[in-house]
Image (cartoon, rainbow, N blue to C red):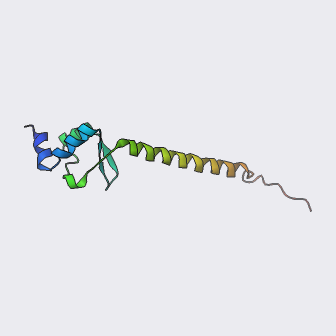
Amino acid sequence: MSELEATIERLGMKDLFERADRDGLWFWCGYQDLWFTPDALRREMSGGRFRWGAVNWELRDPKGKLAALEAEENRARTDRKAIERELATRAPAGTAKRTER
């Protein structure tokens, strides 16, 4: 058994890694909204990082993260267009026209 495999077992994550590999799920940590593929988390753990117990991780479908990112992107695009429209209706600073009386 490799050091990494021993660490994964000691942290109670063996079943999580097996399920993630089998079902195409990713590891998510809600404390900092961290996402890792199983292979990426193994690499990080091999380097001594993110060696946290199973209680700190949740397996999630990465497609859900993609959908959330797409929704966030759409909201940002809508907000940007609203700001651009608002700016287009205003005269540049210092160039406001005076009204004749």
Which residue is most to the bottom? 101
- When asked about the image quadrant of residue 24, the answer is top left
Q: Position of residue 28 (x, y in %)?
A: 30, 48
Q: Residue at x 22, y 38 (%)?
A: 43
Q: Tell me: 73 left or right of 7.
A: right
Which residue is most to the left? 1
Q: Position of residue 44 (x, y in %)?
A: 23, 41
Q: Residue at x 18, y 40 (%)?
A: 46
- When asked about the image quadrant of residue 41, the answer is top left
Q: Residue at x 23, y 48 (%)?
A: 50
Q: Where is residue 100 in the image (x, y as percent from the top left)?
A: 91, 59
Q: Tell me: 72 left or right of 11.
A: right
- When asked about the image quadrant of residue 8, the answer is top left
Which residue is most to the front? 23
Q: Tell me: 90 left or right of 33.
A: right
Could you tell me which quadrant the N terminus lies in? top left
Could you tell me which quadrant the C terminus lies in? bottom right
Q: How many labels does the image show?
A: 0
Q: Where is residue 73 in the image (x, y as percent from the top left)?
A: 51, 45
Q: Tell me: 52 left or right of 3.
A: right
